[in-house]
Amino acid sequence: MKSSIALTLILTAAALAGCNTWSAAKQDAKQVGSTVTHAVGTGLDKAGDGLNTAGEKVKGVAK
């Protein structure tokens, strides 16, 4: 009887630890996704700015 109670407590503790780990992993993945999305958006903004600047320089040379 004592061994089954101990086994139940160990399994319960392991299950709860797994839930916390899974929850943390999902949160980490969400933060990484947000960071990557922000980085890509920033890169695209900078690329757009570069294209605008290049376009203005081409117009200036053509005049």
Image (cartoon, grey):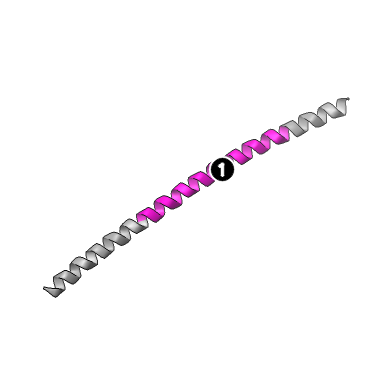
18 shown above or below 2: below
Amino acid beneath label 1: Lys
Residue farthest to the right? 1
9 shown above or below 61: above
55 shown above or below 17: below
Quadrant of the rendering where the C terminus is positioned: bottom left
Quadrant of the rendering where the N terminus is positioned: top right
22 shown above or below 45: above
Residue at image location 27% in from the left, 63% down from the top: 50
Is 27 magenta? The answer is yes
24 vs 44, left or right, is right
- Quadrant of residue 18 in the image? top right
What type of secondary structure mainly makes up the magenta span? helix
Residue at image location 29% in from the left, 60% down from the top: 48
* Residue 10 position within the rendered picture, expressed as x and y whole percent measured from the top left: 77, 32
How many numbered discs?
1
* Residue 4 position within the rendered picture, expressed as x and y whole percent measured from the top left: 85, 29
Graded by Cα atoms within 10 Å as few (under 14), some (14 to 19) or many (20 or more), the crowding at tag 1 reads few
Residue farthest to the left? 63
45 vs 2, left or right, is left
Residue located beneath label 1 in the image: 26
* Residue 46 position within the rendered picture, expressed as x and y whole percent measured from the top left: 31, 58
23 vs 57, left or right, is right
Segment tinted magenta in the rendering? 13-42
